[in-house]
Amino acid sequence: MTSTAAPAPTDPTPDTGPEDTVRAWAAGPADPARFPFGAVHDLARVTGRNHLPLGLLAALRTLRTGLPVGAGGAEADPDHLFLRAWLPMASDVGEGDYDSYVGAEVLAVLHGQHRDWSAGEVLDTTTVALLADLVAGECARLDDAAPDRDRSRRLRAVTAALAGWQQLAPWARNAPPGWLAAGGTGDAGEIGAVVHRAGGLTAAVARRTDPATAAAVRCSFLPTTTVHDELMFIRTIQLFECLYQQVERALDHAVDAVAAGRPAEAAAELSRAASRMQASPLLYRIVTTMPKDSFAVIRDATSGRSALQSRAFRRVEQLCGHPLLAGTEGGVRDRLVDLDEVWTAMKRTHWGIALKIIGRVQGTGGTAGADFLRERAERSLVPTAAVEVAA
């Protein structure tokens, strides 16, 4: 991402269909369950979110600041909460941040809609649904054009990640059956066989994904450009966000366990966190398929938004310096060092990929770009002395 200012919204088309549809909804009963998400998303995928018509953008921003609240406790209604989470993402042109770009609040709503699930189950179920949507998108892309080498490589990478769900999302409730996920998806083999297997995986996930998760995943993709590769870019950021949140949860539990005098439990949590991070190469293999020219377009459209703004990412690095963890010895300390090793390897991989794709251009907010990532990659998660953690 560059430090170029985000483009101002423009009005490239006189078509006000979606705007009229949104205004008609607001003027009527304004039932959140009947909001015309599809009309907005269909247009955004044609124009890019940054180029939605000005009238539609104004209508969405009006709703964002004054969403009608009906009788009977609409604030607690899942559909109302979902719409309230979606509107900032849909209308963030020129004022968005990392969270609005990746639809973080839209996906976070799922925690409240699945109160009988653990947070880990929600995140893993979301992870598998995101992967399946990405695989389906790449299959559709092959339907539109001949499967050249780059497109075939992307499809193999995303299918391998979905097939490897047990590493990335072992608590998923919508995972494909083991017999379907088993087997390799390497570079060898006919692309037709890969497409067939990808279709089987995505169909199995679709049958097992609950409607709330399916809707959240569908509505959390609102591209800023018309570049196909932004589907991969947004989905992989969302997948890493789920991964970071799982590691953050494990660290929170480890801190609580140490405080309660249960070091074995804390060590087990840290071990699970390290195991999670060992799956990150599956996601980075997907990222390496990003063409330089495509990323340049996406970067210019997403100025000011960086994955380093992820709250979960920052929280992981803060929690590893928590006095109750950093000051321990024995098994807890050993497992913290294990987590440090895989986390540092992940950051070094990020740096290497950034160097390959964007070179040494200036990064977002005036940072040194890839050189900035390299400097961060050298920072250990395990401090030599305990430090205070931000609340």
Image (cartoon, helix red, strand yellow):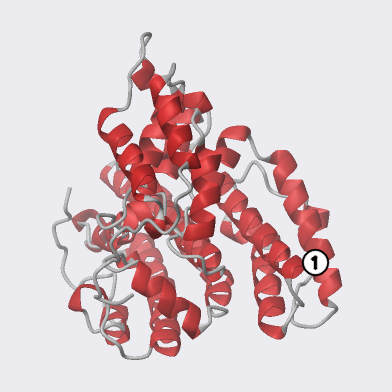
Would residue 224 appear left or right of 278 to someone viewing this image? left
In the orientation shown, which residue stands out farthest toward the top?
Answer: 72
Q: Classify 122 as above or below 347.
A: above
Task: List x then y, in percent, for residue 347.
Answer: 38, 76
Using the rendered view, name the quadrant where residue 73 is placed: top left
* Residue at 53% from the left image edge and 82% from the top image edge: 291
Q: Quadrant of the image for the N terminus?
A: bottom left
Q: Classify 240 as above or below 115.
A: below
* Residue at 43% from the left image edge and 57% from the top image edge: 241
Is residue 262 in view? no
Would residue 158 appear left or right of 212 to someone viewing this image? right
Q: Along the line of sight, which residue is nearer the eye, 162 or 301?
A: 301
Task: List x then y, in percent, for residue 218.
Answer: 56, 46
Is residue 371 in view? yes
Task: List x then y, in percent, for residue 367.
Answer: 21, 79
Using the rendered view, name the quadrant where residue 281 is placed: bottom right
* Residue at 42% from the left image edge and 70% from the top image edge: 338
Q: Name the residue under label 1.
A: 195
Helix, strand or loop status at disc 1: helix
Going by the numbered disc 1, the residue's amino acid type is: Val
In the orientation shown, which residue stands out farthest toward the front?
Answer: 14
* Residue at 16% from the left image edge and 63% from the top image edge: 386
Q: Along the line of sight, which residue is nearer the eye, 336 or 131?
A: 131
> How packed is label 1: few (under 14 Cα within 10 Å), some, or many (20 or more)?
many
Task: List x then y, in percent, for residue 323.
Answer: 19, 57
Q: Along the line of sight, which residue is nearer the eye, 166 or 226?
A: 226
Using the rendered view, name the quadrant where residue 66 is placed: top left
Q: How many labels, in total?
A: 1
